[in-house]
Amino acid sequence: MANFQKLTSRAEDYSKWYNELVVKADLAEQSAVRGCMVIKPYGYAIWETIQSELDRRFKEQGVKNAYFPLLIPKSFLSREAEHVEGFAKECAVVTHHRLMNDPNGKGVVVDPNAKLEEELVIRPTSETIIWNTYKNWISSYRDLPILCNQWCNVMRWEMRTRLFLRTAEFLWQEGHTAHATKEEAEDYARKMLDVYADFAENVMAIPVIKGVKSPNERFAGALNTYCIEAMMQDGKALQAGTSHFLGQNFAKSFEVQFLSKENKYEYVWATSWGVSTRLMGALIMTHSDDNGLVLPPHLAPIQVVFVPIFKKEEDLNKLLEKINPIADNLKKMGIRVKVDTADNMTPGYKFADYELKGVPVRLAMGGRDLENGTIEVARRDTLTKETVSIDHIEEVIKNLLEEIQTNCYKKALDYRTANIRECDSYEQFKTEIQKGGFLLCHWDGTPETEERIKNETKATIRCIPLEALPGYKEESGKCMVTGKPSAKRVVFAIAY
Amino acid sequence: MANFQKLTSRAEDYSKWYNELVVKADLAEQSAVRGCMVIKPYGYAIWETIQSELDRRFKEQGVKNAYFPLLIPKSFLSREAEHVEGFAKECAVVTHHRLMNDPNGKGVVVDPNAKLEEELVIRPTSETIIWNTYKNWISSYRDLPILCNQWCNVMRWEMRTRLFLRTAEFLWQEGHTAHATKEEAEDYARKMLDVYADFAENVMAIPVIKGVKSPNERFAGALNTYCIEAMMQDGKALQAGTSHFLGQNFAKSFEVQFLSKENKYEYVWATSWGVSTRLMGALIMTHSDDNGLVLPPHLAPIQVVFVPIFKKEEDLNKLLEKINPIADNLKKMGIRVKVDTADNMTPGYKFADYELKGVPVRLAMGGRDLENGTIEVARRDTLTKETVSIDHIEEVIKNLLEEIQTNCYKKALDYRTANIRECDSYEQFKTEIQKGGFLLCHWDGTPETEERIKNETKATIRCIPLEALPGYKEESGKCMVTGKPSAKRVVFAIAY
């Protein structure tokens, strides 16, 4: 049962609002295992839609799904030098393969005789085990490209966790491709970034900035990390997806060579790219309000809910005579519909529950509507309602869902636009950045300057945009900190 | 590149034939981690179809997907007494959460300061963590039933592993339901068995016997384990799916009570049910032959492949003018089609490759076919081919796919029928069981007798059939070992 104690408002405590919303809207909860979440059916249904929309797009790019082992031999992690430095330390380590009855009493203990010769690590990401596998798949240019993806769980031992945003275990997809040429690999990494951006904007209704990471923020082992960055309603940045050009680093570490058309042995070129259940966090923090979740229709498990208002069962039956054919027509149009006939909850309770859960369109019908041939249509995004004729209601609803989808995106874009600004003085920057939002600044391109800004303000370079942001021109200038030349402005923000 | 060295024949060495086939048909391979497999794209595509067909059927039964943590606190496993005895010993144990640079040189070692207070186990199955979660979800009869499923990886530290059949890590789905009454829970466990049987027979074309396990073969913690049992081409049995009625065991172990309509606190009733990537093994061993994989069309990632026979590109283009419209029509009919235009492999090579990979229908077209308006249609199941007119070829292919699906099932059913027999003498049983197949015998219902038969012959009771097998009558009799009364015959076999 949902709990209708009012949510903490965003203005009051944004972070608390988020935590409460995730739990009250039945999306996820903490489990008995520190840092690991339970994704509840309603939250998982959203993730399933995310998966199917992405999966279809991947397959259009020639990607095939596969599955690689959960466990990675410890020694693999140190093969690629930067990878292990940047990454692979905080992880779950399997050291034994058996439990036994406790000789001193009840319960079970680890069997000391079942110690593994080499410890295994639960994958924090799979480049190492996958490139160790690709070695056996690749011998000639004819075997290339390889375009694989896996949907799986991964684990990174995070100290401070938050549902969806930062959890020890999370679900994701990781694509790993192998190519004969540098150019092809770079193109592919870029192409997958476009796939992510298209998905974020058209399905999740989240406007994103496509860019490239500064060296400090790059994936450990990558030559280039492309990313999409989104702005949350508190003005913080959230990295919503990354696509890495890995060069020949992993091929060299795992000795993966191919015989080229010119009959020469060459190292293979690689990319990897991923998005995770973190997207659920982005979704919530982009659209939701103080009444609960707001879902863009393309992702909503229930797009339209009918709530008949009745006291007696015969009243319900009369209402259903009108409602069911409409619901059936909507289903045939591919719309996800629920008719809520439960008689142990009041309409008021139901209204509040569907509002909390972000159902885009709520349709209520009572006795008077039946007489008048009308129905009440309530929009979740604007919280407005109006009573309309049920003639051609299917078309009305179909169009309304698209209108809501567009409006969710527009609202988020307007918010972002209002919270992006240029800044040319580092003194001003220090104050401005605390107000939230994205600051477009000149930067001299050095890790030292970036590091200093981070230490002094907590802000990082979210990305070097691939193209000028709407309403801005690309222009050279001088670094706001050192005054050294800068080719173009980069995006600074405090990030999740 | 596929390797066309001939497969070991089934007659020569069935087990070797299986192992070679799995690798050569590009389904799966061993990984660098002992007992863990890599599921290759072609094998994974079959698994994806299995998933989507099952998932649709689950959702029709009201099931919702969710996700529960990979790691389970060690103490959870000993909460349900039988569960830990039967089950939870051979498993991967996480004891530390950090690696560190080796102070003595290169590489990484486990950080001794990062020892966990309580060890965590990688789930061998999730009853414990799920019932610990359900405790928070259930307070009243209004919260019931809960019908959850998760698609995930699980791990059991098997000593002797074989691809798909027995691996340390495998993929599966596990459904876990919670009910207010015993009757409803038992019904649900039975209903899911029917879902599995329907799927096995109509999608996988595998005839199965629905039955209930003897107490010895029951899931640890269950009051009743329902199962579907299939016969492989070597006469051995393979358990293809199980559905457990768990009674109130887990509810009691994890203190899950609900307030009933009568305002009394009662323990919740439970079921769990699962199928795994083991089904891939069943699929292979039911249908395939000495030339490679045979796939029932409903599961084939490629149902129809076109192989144009050409030397020059202009010849290919002429052929494609005919082929492409047909391929497009087939796709519109929902058929999975590939047109193989690769020019770096001979048609002979392609024919052998698609045969090895079990593509149900292969269509070849060359210059003469173009003149005659014909196409060569080859069936994988019967290895027959014939040249037919391309007029209305789409309908011909559509019907042919259904015919192949039916034929795959019929062939498997005929094989099973020919290898089931009654046996009333234990002396005879000892010889007969070595010939393979299922023996229908009377049994006195005691674990002791079952245990004795197992020790002396390696045969186990695969199930007590829910209904008489086709061609057999249900009849009482006397146990073949002890002569004690038996209500009906049970199925004995040597099993995978």
Image (cartoon, coloured by chain):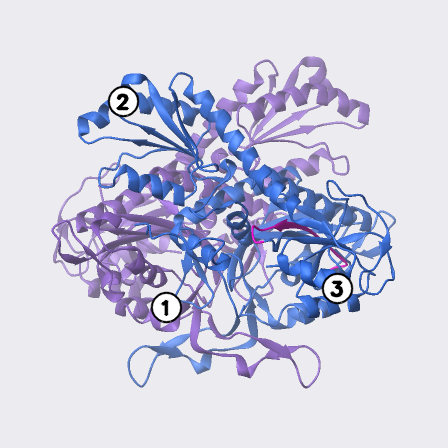
Chain colours: A blue, B purple
What amino acid is labelled 3 in the image?
A: Glu
Provide the residue span drawn in magenta: A222-234
Front in this rendered view, residue B313 or B475: B313
Task: Tell me residue A5's x, y (percent).
Answer: 33, 53
Q: Which residue is mark 1?
A: B88
| Chain ID of residue with mark 2 | A
Task: Tell me residue A208's x, y (percent).
Answer: 65, 45
Residue A223 among those drawn in magenta: yes
Q: Residues within 10 Å of mark 2 (few under 14, many from 20)?
A: few
Up-down relation of residue B409 to residue B214 (above or below): above
Residue A143 among those drawn in magenta: no
Q: Residue A427: give its label.
A: 3
Q: Is residue A86 left or right of residue B478?
A: right
Residue B443 figure quarter? bottom left
What amino acid is labelled 1 in the image?
A: Ala
Q: Is residue B407 left or right of residue B78?
A: right
Gap between marks 2 and 1 measured at Cα: 61 Å
Q: Residue B280: give its label.
A: none
Q: Earlier in the sequence, mark 3 or mark 2?
A: 2
| Chain ID of residue with mark 3 | A
Q: Which residue is mark 2?
A: A368
